[in-house]
């Protein structure tokens, strides 16, 4: 069987390295070119020896010979590239935030970028938009925090008969430090971050409008109170989200559990657990664990979710989207 | 000047070791006896070489020759000891949860202990009850999570003209693993907890009624919605609490900041910061950092606090209480 | 094609869990039964949620219905089981130290076990004994430290024209804490081991005779000075070995490099690197990296090796041995 | 009593911050000015909030109003400053490597600096040169690795009747990452170094000639084989050194132990332990622990030492030197 040809633009960061690893072992594709910028000229093995890959990072020159392009670039860099790749008939999966928001005002407010998205891409969260993704040619891959939060809340907002009852949501998410990318910032050095925890961008993180939009409302005109506190902790990988939800109505723990089980019954990578989850349960996997940790009769819920930020929160979900676009089983190359 | 004589009952755990360290260097007291149970017969230096202390842990036999006794025992063990020490005219500072709750029904519900407190001790949080502590003979030292949460919320509840306006509070606190004590549990081993985060006792942690009682309400009949999610993360020391508060009224960031500054103006160990705090700012100190991270006009607040769980959350606060009881400067032996 | 049936006895420890993971994804075998002792009755997913395996650990009752048995038991436990499995015609791969040593006196001295090995099994280090393993029915899988040290030294001792020139070897190896097993010891807790390093069993570790025997000499009557200092550090996985070698003759860096390259030219899982290696290069892989870090004209060498203690040091090497015994490509199921 | 006035040049790095902390709490000195370069204009509390110090870092302009100057600058920067401070009659303690080596050829070879030392300063290792330090006006403070290695070997070389019997020494030292300074290098980020170990500068580290010179020989013309392998591991603080020594004569464990005990009997900060040491025993202290882990009759020794690289390996030892120079008790301000 002919394999699809795949290239990565922005291959030398952590998400790019995970994409490289996953595509090298994927049975249905052939990894073609790895494009990078400051690292152009280096071998993959110079940066990521564990990948045992001798390919050389090249600067991207507009080449369009592959069937599929993954973009794992800093925010803003994909704005130009995606339209030309789409125009050249390529399948595109963009891991940046450049095309996630439909509202250009929100995009500008949260990404501090003057340019507004020039194309609307399909939002690549398979558990919510599987059919759209199957028919899409261009995917905007969800944010890492957004994935961990949306998957924890979606049944309440998008499940049958469940919507419109949420009064307030407070999210506190702890991310592994790899979420900040392959970085040389002093404040992300081992000596600063071991034995440490630090919140940042409280209430103003750019995943806020993405979460709101996907849940059917907006950051600009929200239908419920929403606060998001991101933190980094002393671990490399993983996002652990604690979601405090206040419903407008009484709640029954069994009903809520059943709502969640039903909502995700066909989702191979969401695991609704009856016991507590932890980062260790999902690290190095594409799974999102969801646990209903606390439900009170008065309608207070605590939902805990865990993902690997580089897999379900980035490269793994991107491969999941590619599998759907190409008509493969959703989990091809993502298990084991 | 004659030094006060001090002994520790339950000296071989992590809080006991920090008490040992602090009392050895305290200029106004003489560390007398170190009592332990399973570790009786060992030298301090066998367990805590860094303390360079050759004293031998002894089993406690009812001796009452010291002026002051610190108790750092597992919950339930202090219930018998405190009354006899008080009866013998000793000053007592108990670091367990045995005497923190006034309501015996709540004590039984949250500590799973049939016995109800036989004496009401002074709750030893100097920032709220300094005068009471100065006049007290027996102190119940606050819980670690409780300290980090109460100090973050107290100005809203107990500051002048501020009370009665809170509608809901969601607390998500990450603790260092030393909070679980000097333990041999598999789930606290390095191999299980490095690169990991795990929530536990969501909504049912025993510090819940302590927090509510101290804020002027109760867990049994709360005046506002309250949810507390404790977690352990991959660090030894520290508690980092994210407090989501929903007020019943609009909020002004400057007013709230001013309320906090004023409330803690005479508290040498609470630092209201205008920039983000992190565990690293308080580790190995007796300080509690408080930062108002986010305030919306509609009355949503995010308050972040950080303490060292073994110091301000246990041994350090206990010494602070001792200093007040003995008429010393509150910070004697606790700085530098 | 019919798949081989495989079972694991001692499946609930860390090596057992890695075997489970690798066998579940191996294309040529079917994982049959998982036997455990204290964990019998639990599901795999209760202990190792990330494996997403619903099998139940059972107590082992002498069953012999599988084609192949892996034993991952505490030292001493395999002594009885291996002979009966071999007698029943089963292929056996034992990950313990029970059958590694040919000399019963050394076995008793280093393993403190009165029983001497009742059968000589093939020592399963494919890079040295590939042909023997292909023809073997029973394999004794090498120790983790032993693997990292032997692979770093073997070319000097077993390479053509190179032997008999080593005067002294000092090995200092740092292991991840998972090497101590799934443990509930206080001294392996996160609070004790984060930010810590500790040597142990200096000069008396049980891998010493295994290393000497495999290099063609013996611990009892060594042909060169040998000292081994094992340490545990603040990491879960990996062994990093620094091997100081003093030759009896002058050395040329290029000659030594060429000797190593040639020795491992057909070894798919040994990577002789020209730049420094680190744990990160081999973690979560079956590779052993070897780097000649320093060679002086007078014949002093420093060789640095890195492996994942649970993979190349245990479960991965065991699968590599199984592949050879079954006639598969050596790396089947071990890449990507 | 009048306090001595002290300033720090190069105060914003990790050693500078530890000096700041120690000098702020030292009872006999007054911390005057904190000089920094890239961080000039910042408050101490901006970089090191835990110090609760509001002083502002200033650029150094040649001021000489303090009694004592500590220099904690990158290598090369102190070469100009020390002579002018000495000429101005100031006491100087330099923490860099600029004045440690007597041999300008070795200085140039190992520090890659063309300039040779323009003054010979007293080498500030109190355990070896206490009398010289008491009478000195200018101290060159030892290197961190050098301290951990020299203190582990000195009794063999400098103890009565013990010298000239060492044939070979192999040192393998693991350092906390703070040893690399307050850094923004990608390879020192948390994501790169957590769960990692990496050797570097094997055989060529600049502490090699310092060690040899202090032990009475030289790197250029050594009296014994010497190899030093430095590594960084996943911890912030500490150096753990494993010293393999081969004597030219048989060894008796009790004799060696007695030699070490006697050699350090008057050294308040060296602890010769009869049980294994670990980083945890010395972290956040000025102690060096030394343990004779293994002695064979044929004269092979394994000595293990542990220090806190920022204290005994830098700022703590510097204060110890200051105490001696000023006639105070050696441990003033360094205990508890």
Image (cartoon, coloured by chain):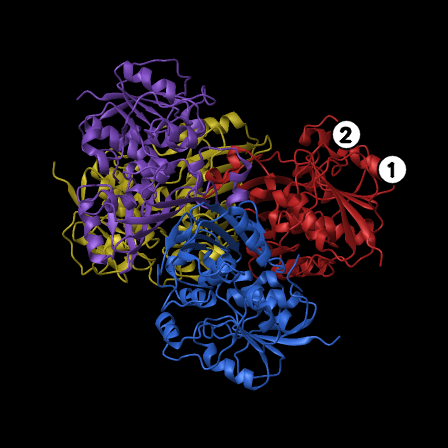
Chain colours: A blue, B purple, C red, D yellow
Residue C183, position in %: x, y? 58, 36
Q: Chain of mark 2?
A: C
Q: Residues within 10 Å of mark 1 (few under 14, many from 20)?
A: few
Residue A314, position in %: x, y? 53, 65
Q: Which residue is mark 2?
A: C116
The quarter holding residue C273 reads: bottom right
Q: Is residue B46 left or right of residue C90?
A: left
Q: Is residue A1 left or right of residue A244?
A: right
Residues tagged by mark 1 and mark 2 found on one chain of the structure = yes
Q: Which mark is residue C87?
A: 1
Is D316 drawn above or below residue D9 in the view shown? above
Residue A140, position in %: x, y? 51, 72
Residue sitting nearer the eye, C255 or C67? C67
Q: Report helix, strand or loop for mark 2.
A: loop
Q: Which mark is residue C68?
A: none
**In the rendered view of the protein, which quadrant contains the C terminus of chain B?**
top left
Q: Would you say residue C314 is visible in this rendering?
A: yes
Residue contact between numbered discs 1 and 2, judged by CB atoms under 8 Å:
no
Say how many tags the image has: 2
Nearest to viewer (mark 1 / mark 2) = 1
**In the rendered view of the protein, which quadrant contains the N terminus of chain B?**
top left
Residue sitting nearer the eye, D14 or A276? A276
Decide which of tag 1 and tag 2 comes sooner along the chain. 1
Q: Chain of mark 1?
A: C
Q: Report helix, strand or loop for mark 1.
A: helix
Is C69 drawn above or below residue A131 in the view shown? above
The quarter holding residue C99 reads: top right
Residue sitting nearer the eye, A156 or C13? A156
Q: Would you say residue C296 is visible in this rendering?
A: no
Q: Is residue B85 left or right of residue B254?
A: right
Residue C308, position in %: x, y? 62, 50
Residue sitting nearer the eye, B150 or D59? B150
């Amino acid at each position: 069987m002919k394999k699809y040809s795949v290239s990565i633009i922005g291959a030398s960061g952590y998400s790019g390295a995970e994409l490289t690893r996953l595509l090298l072992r994927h049975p249905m594709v052939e990894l073609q070119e790895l494009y990078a910028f400051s690292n152009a000229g280096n071998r993959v093995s110079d940066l990521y020896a564990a990948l045992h890959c001798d390919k050389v990072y090249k600067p991207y020159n507009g080449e369009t010979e592959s069937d599929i392009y993954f973009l794992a670039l800093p925010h803003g860099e994909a704005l130009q590239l995606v339209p030309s790749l789409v125009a050249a008939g390529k399948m595109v999966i963009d891991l940046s935030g450049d095309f996630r928001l439909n509202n250009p005002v929100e995009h500008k407010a949260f990404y501090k970028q003057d340019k507004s998205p020039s194309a609307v891409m399909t939002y690549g969260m398979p558990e919510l938009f599987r059919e759209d993704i199957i028919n899409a040619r261009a995917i905007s891959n969800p944010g890492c925090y957004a994935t961990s939060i949306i998957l924890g809340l979606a049944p309440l907002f998008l499940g049958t008969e469940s919507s419109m009852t949420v009064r307030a949501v407070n999210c506190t998410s702890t991310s592994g430090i790899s979420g900040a990318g392959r970085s040389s910032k002093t404040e992300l050095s081992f000596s600063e971050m071991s034995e440490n925890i630090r919140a940042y961008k409280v209430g103003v993180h750019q995943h806020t409008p993405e979460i709101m939009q996907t849940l059917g409302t907006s950051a600009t005109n929200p239908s419920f109170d929403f606060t998001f506190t991101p933190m980094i902790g002393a671990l490399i990988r993983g996002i652990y989200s604690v979601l405090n939800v206040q419903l407008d109505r009484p709640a029954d723990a069994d009903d809520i559990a059943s709502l969640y089980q039903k909502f995700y019954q066909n989702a191979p990578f969401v695991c609704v657990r009856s016991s507590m989850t932890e980062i260790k349960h999902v690290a190095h996997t594409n799974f999102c664990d969801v646990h209903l940790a606390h439900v009170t009769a008065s309608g207070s819920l605590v939902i805990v979710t865990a993902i690997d930020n580089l897999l379900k929160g980035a490269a793994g979900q991107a491969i999941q989207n590619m599998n759907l676009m190409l008509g493969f089983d959703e989990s091809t190359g993502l298990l084991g």
